Amino acid sequence: MARYRLDIEYDGTPYAGWQRQAGQHTVQAALEQAILKFSGESITLRGAGRTDSGVHATGQVAHIDLAREWPQDKVRDAINAHLRLVAEAVSVTRALRTSDDFDARFSATARHYLYRILNRRAHPALEKNRSWWVPTPLDAEAMQEAGRHLLGRHDFTTFRSSQCQANSPLRTLDLLDVTRIGDIIEVRTSARSFLHNQVRSMVGTLKRVGEGGWTAADVKAALEAKDRAACAGIAPPEGLYLTKVDYSA
């Protein structure tokens, strides 16, 4: 048995999320079908994060076990060949032979996300399905200042989906940076792990600050409320990207 780490990018627009679901077009299922066509093996792909419908990735990581050992480049190229044949919006950027104890999910030490907001009056043409279009002017500096209240270890119930299956709402947010580059506002976040919809809920709340509807004190109060109803809003999925997953080795 040979274990491979796969680094993956995908456009989440046509998919019902990462996780395989009966009767749904998902990233996991597309990859598993391509691996079956290449290797003749029905395998279960284990991913580092279960991105929602419409969410993109430039740095998703997964692992697979194959009965036969193949050259790393062969694994990458063969999977991609079968993905291209059926026009999937998924690409394996690297396949790496790894140790048997590597686990894409449980070995991860940090996950990094980027959220992109297109902040201009004109509607998007090239940025459609790649960012959240917000025509109202946003104050990125105010968003950055408010975001500081979310850093550190907290009970993030306010920013957690009601369908979240995590055992605890406690998480440690290591990074939350808001920067403007022309018409694009980028929100970058890092943590060992995130709750379901946590990033999109935080961005939706910071957007309220950026447009002047909330203050930094309101964000602090919402966090301390530990109540989903206190969240100012949830950003749509199309602006969110899983950009990187860290491992200790």
Image (cartoon, rainbow, N blue to C red):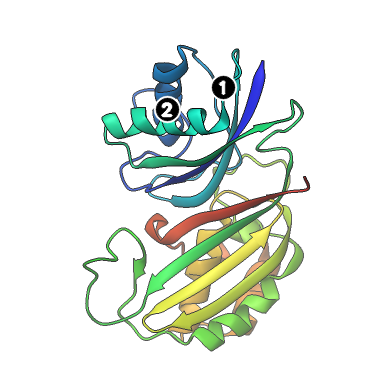
Classify the position of the N terminus by image quarter.
top right
Determine whether, in the image, residue 193 is placed left or right of residue 144: right
Q: Report if the CB atoms under discs 1 and 2 are less than 8 Å apart.
A: yes
Label 1 environment density (alpha carbons within 10 Å; few <14, some 14–19, many ≥20): some
Q: How many numbered discs?
A: 2
Q: For the residue labelled by badge 1, is the local secondary structure a helix, a strand or a loop?
A: loop
Q: Residue 209, image x and y in percent? A: 51, 81
In the image, residue 72 lies at what x, y percent? 57, 31
Q: Nearer the viewer, residue 108 or 200?
A: 108
Identify whether 173 is placed above or below 102.
Answer: below
Whole-number angstrom distance, CA of label 1 to CA of label 2: 10 Å
Instruction: Judge whether residue 21 can be spotted in this image.
Output: no
Tell me what residue is drawn at x 33 percent, y 83 percent. 136
Image side of residue 90 versus residue 152, left or right? left
Residue type at mark 1 is Trp
In this rendering, the answer to whether 114 lies above or below 104 is: below
Which numbered disc covers residue 188?
A: none
Q: Quadrant of residue 145?
A: bottom right
Q: Residue at x 69, y 76 (%)?
A: 149
**Image quadrant containing the C terminus:** top right
The amino acid on which the numbered mark 2 sits, given as a three-letter code, is: Ala
Picture quadrant where residue 199 is located:
bottom right
- Is label 2 in a helix, a strand or a loop? helix
Q: Position of residue 34 (x, y in %)?
A: 40, 25
Q: Which residue is mark 1?
A: 70
Residue that carries the numbered disc 2 in the rendered image: 78
Q: Nearer the viewer, residue 224 or 242?
A: 242
In the image, residue 222 above or below residue 9: below
The image position of residue 141, as x and y in percent, is 54, 88
